[in-house]
Image (cartoon, rainbow, N blue to C red):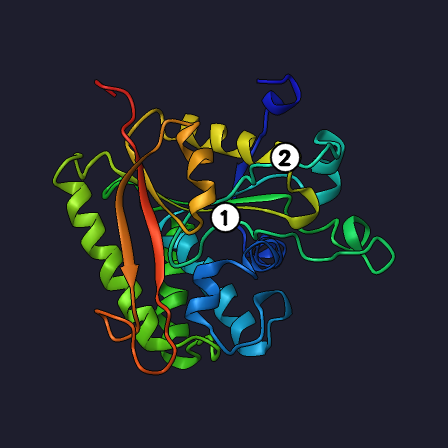
Amino acid sequence: MSAKSMVKVDLFPVHKESSIPAIARTVNHAFSSDPLIRWLRPNATPWAQQDTSSGSWQYRRIQRIMFEGEVFRSGDVRQMADKFPQRARSKVSTCTPTAPVTALPEKEPKISMEDGGINSSRQDAGAVVFLFPPPGRASWSLPRIWLACKLWFLDRLAPAHDSGVREKRVQVLMEKHDESVKLLEATFPKQKLWYLEVIAVHPSLQSRGLGGGVMRWALEHMQNEPVYLECTREENIGFYESFGFEVAEVVEMFEDGSHRDGEGDQGFKHWVMVHPGKKGS
C-alpha cells in the first residue's frame, strides 16, 4: 500500500446543528447517482439538485442520526484537498456504505472550478460518517435530551418528508434491512454489532485515497468489534473485502415485495457485508 493511501484521516463528532448544512451537501452530492437512491426516487429531482421538501427531510434525517447514532465529519473540502492531493484515477472506485442511503457515485458529477468546484464548496465537509453503535452504548446527556424533545415536537408540528421518494419501495427496503439484521444477530452478539450506514466523500475529493483513510478510521473507532454495511454496487465489493469485510447476504428487492412488477420496476440488489472484528474484542 502506498504512503499516500496511508495518510491519516482525523474525523470529529458532530453535536452542533450548525454543521448539518455542510454535511448534508456532501451527502447529497456523493449519493445523488447512487443506484439505491435512484430506485427509491425513480422520477424525482436528483439529490444534488434537491428541492425544499427533500432538503428539509435530509436536514431532519441528520438530526435524527445525531440523536440515535453518531455523526462524524472531517475538515472542509479545501483542508482535505491539501492533505489528499489529486492523483491518477484508480480503476477500483472507493465506494461507501449503506441503507437507507449508500455508496459513492460511479461517476463523479461535473463540478467545474469556474462555477465552484473546490472553491465554491470549500465549506462542505470533505468526508462524512454515519454510525449506529450497539444498543445501550449511547449515554443520556443534556444536549441529547434536548434534541430528543426537539425532534418529538418537530415531527408533530412540522413533519419533514422527501416528496420524491416512492414510499412503497422505502417500506420494502426497511423490511429487508430488518430481516438482514436478525440474521446477523443470530451470529454476532447484539451488544457488539455496529451498523456503518454511510461513508460519504465529497465528489471533488474522490479517487485520492480519502475513502480508504476514512474506512480505516471507522474500524479503529469501533475498536475491532463486528460491523455490517450494505453495498449497492457489485464492483465495490472488492474495496470492502480489502478491509476484511465478507458478503453475508445478497438481497433483492422489488416494489411489490417479491418479484418484478408490471410497471417497469427492475428491482434493486445490494450486498450485506460484515466485518467480524477480532475475536475477544
Which image quarter holds the N terminus? top right
Residue 145, percent from left and from top: 36, 55
Is residue 266 or residue 279 the one in the foreground? 266
Q: Compared to 86, does 106 lie above or below?
A: below
Q: Compared to 70, does 170 lie above or below?
A: below
Q: Identify which residue is drawn at 42% across, 69% down.
A: 40
Labels 2 and 1: the sequence-earlier one: 1
Q: Compared to 257, does 27 lie above or below?
A: above
Local crowd size for mark 2, using a 10 Å CA cut-off: few (<14), some (14–19), many (≥20): few
Total marks drawn? Answer: 2
Residue 50, percent from left and from top: 60, 71
From the image, state whether disc 2 or disc 1 is nearer to you.
2
Report the side of 279 relative to 11 (left or right): left
Is residue 154 or residue 261 the one in the foreground? 261
Residue 237 appears in view: yes
Is residue 220 or residue 14 the one in the foreground? 220
Task: Find the residue positioned furthest to the left.
Answer: 186
Residue 16, percent from left and from top: 54, 51
Q: Which mark is residue 267?
A: none
Q: Residue 148's image quarter?
A: bottom left
Disc 2 is placed on an element classified as: loop
- State the separation of the CA atoms marked 2 and 1: 34 Å
The amino acid type found where label 1 is placed reads His
Q: Which residue lies under the disc numbered 2?
A: 90
Report the side of 88 relative to 196 (left or right): right
Q: Identify which residue is drawn at 57% across, 51% down.
A: 106
Residue 76 appears in view: no
